[in-house]
Every structure is written in structure tokens, then in C-alpha cells.
Amino acid sequence: MNQNIREPLYLKIYKDFLDRIDRGDFKNNDKIPTEVELSESYNVSRITTRKALNMLSEQGIVNRVPGLGSFISEDGVEKTINQKIDQHSKTKRIGFIISGIQDSFGHTLLSTLEDLLYAKWFSLLLGISDQNAEKESRLLKSFIEQKVDGIIISPVDDENFSTEILSLVMKKFPIVLVDRYLRDLGNCSNVVSDNEKATFTAVNYLFEHNHKNIAVFSRKINSTSTLTERYNGVINAYAERGLPVNKNYWYTSFKKVEYYSKNLFVHNIELIKEFLTQNREITAVVTMEYLFTQYLISAISEMGLSIPDDISLVGFDGPGYSVENTPALTYVMQDEAKIAQEVFSLLMKAMKGVEKSEKILVPCTFIEGTSVRSI
């Protein structure tokens, strides 16, 4: 089971310093190593060590004197002991389950949650479900057995939520859903991107560039997924212009969707090549997540075609870096940091016993690259 307790490096250094002071390595008024020396000792950047030292300074344990260095304060040892006692009394554990961590989505969400939780002295238990319902169920049971104080979860794409999630919601356990929501069970808070507006903007952008034959690549829609909202955005864009929707261009027949399976990757590329060959009138594609963008880029390359000369592309989520031999991607960017902040806020409310559930919509940003041409 892929489950780890993670914490930021600066916090590890901070805690290590508290331990060193507590065991007598440093006494009141002692000079401590410089940022450079600490960076070399812990094999981290100076930004990381500076953040740890700033925490010690804010708590009055260390005095930072410009030009002279950093010193344990006159009562630094006593404050260290009190701080460790305070930490121990406040420590809570939060379980976080997500399907996977990619550069396109997940990395910023996780790192922001880590910072917010650790600022409150919460430990984070991370579980990776790999879009596997059985693994998700085991992770949830494990977190409950470990008596976590709250759970954040981005459930797997499935027709129904797991019985474990439903049970936790019914028991009013502090739980917040990310990128999913319970349609028929209103007493569970969730945070999702404004998917409908995002895909409306994406399709409308293609219309503005005179595209009419637009394909959509996605997983199959189910009752728990936010894909319904993304599809509604597509339909609304057509409706606003009085255009008919050709659902023959909506491709969801992928064998299976996994980020780390080379065989499935190759198989799904072949499916896209077959689909595009059978529908040569298609001039643009909207992909509902970054994995499908990767499929499409590979398929177009293998077909001897190019983006955007032959096929224009608008994606959902981006890699955060340039892709070799591919124009800058035009895509919808989800605000992961804002999502994390809203999730954290809702979880804190739930842990305080606030029973009112909330659904938070977080706006997306449309990033205009060079993967779309006018026709």
C-alpha cells in the first residue's frame, strides 16, 4: 500500500533543531551554524534552511543578528521545551487520498496542503489509490484504524462512491471531497474547479477560431465524476451559438486510463489514430485531462500530422513545462493552491463540529498557447 507520512524539509530541519537544543547540543546564547552551513549539512537549499530559522526566530528560540549570525536566545532552551510540549498536545493526523501525483495536477495541491496542515502541527498521511477502488477502500480502512482526525479524498472515478466514504459521511466524520461530489447526499463538503465554465471557455475559444468539427476526448461519464460539469460546458458553448452537438465526435471508448501503464498508453494511442482516420473532417480536439493530451500528441505525431496545422488542441491541465517538438499548449489551468486552501478551511470547520456542508467552486485560468490555429 502506497502510504507515507510526509512533511516539508524546512519543518524537518526545524524539528531537528528543537531536538538538538532539547538534548543539550546548544545552550542559551550559543551561536548556531549559518544558512550556508545548514544547507550543506542537510543537503537542501538556503531557502529551506532560511524558512526553518525564521520559524525558530518567530517563536523567540533563535535571535538573528544581521552581520553577526544566529544565536539561541537567552531563554531559548526553556522556550524549546515549552514548544515541544505544545506540539505534542496539538498534533493531529490527517489522511489524504488521491489517485496520483502528476506535474499536470496534484503536486501543487499536495505541497500547499502540507504547508497549511503543518503550520497547525498536523501530520499528513498520504495514500495513492491509483484509480483503484479496492486500494482506495483499504486506504480508508487503514486511516480509520490509525484514528486519523480528518480525511481529504479525491475518490476514484466509479459509478458509485465506496461504502467507506458513505459511512464516514453518515457518521459525520470530518471528510472533504476534492474534485468530486455526492449528488444525492448533500451533507458532505467538497471543493471542485469551475469545470463547466472552463470547458465553455475552451470550446468557445475554438469557435472564435472558426472550428466547427470539434472532438472531445474523455473518460466515460459516471454519477460521481465532475466530468458531467465539463461536458455541460461543452454543450452550453454549442447552445449559445445555436449549433448542433455531434456526439459522434465525443470519444470515451478508451480501454482503460492509467498514467503508468506503457501497454495501455500504446493501445489508447492506436484507438485515437483509428478514430481520427475515420473522422478526417475533425479540425480540433478538446481533451478533458492531461493524459488524453499526451495520447493525442503521440497519435498525431505517429500519423505524420502536426499541431496546430492539422489538428488544433485545447487541453485540461498542462505539464507546467514545454513538451519537445510540440507548440506551447493552450489549456485550462486549475488553481491547485486555491483548491488546497478551500479544502483546508472546510476540513478545519468539520473538525470543529460545523455540520453545514459547502460546495466550493474554484475558478480556472485559460492559458493561451500556440496549439490552436484559425481556419
Image (tube, rainbow, N blue to C red):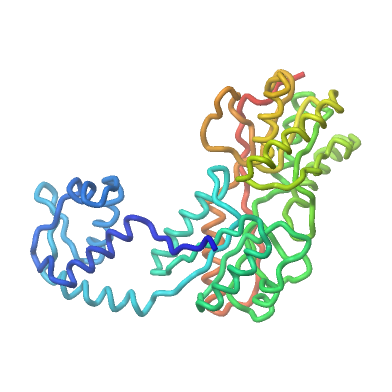
Residue 307 is drawn in which quadrant? top right
Task: Please indicate whether residue 22 sits to the left or right of residue 194 in the image.
Answer: left
Task: Please indicate whether residue 104 sits to the left or right of residue 74 in the image.
Answer: right
Residue 89 is drawn in which quadrant? bottom left
Question: As drawn, which residue projects farthest toward the front?
Answer: 263
Q: Residue 299's x, y, as percent? A: 71, 29
**Residue 342 vertical placement versus 299 (above, below):** below
**Residue 321 vertical placement versus 189 (above, below):** above
Q: Residue 215's x, y, as percent? A: 80, 34
* Quarter of the N terminus within the rendering: bottom right
Q: Residue 367's x, y, as percent? A: 60, 34
**Residue 42 vertical placement versus 168 (above, below):** above
The residue that appears at 69% across and 22% down in the rendered structure is: 308
The residue that appears at 60% across and 77% down in the rendered structure is: 173
Residue 186 is drawn in which quadrant? bottom right
* Quarter of the C terminus within the rendering: top right
**Residue 215 vertical placement versus 325 (above, below):** below
Task: Please indicate whether residue 49 sits to the left or right of residue 102 in the image.
Answer: left
For the residue pair 231 and 41, the one nearer the viewer reads as 41
Q: Residue 124's x, y, as percent? A: 46, 65
The residue that appears at 58% across and 27% down in the rendered structure is: 328
For the residue pair 121 and 290, the one nearer the viewer reads as 290
Tally of numbered discs: 0
Task: Please indicate whether residue 339 sits to the left or right of residue 268 in the image.
Answer: left
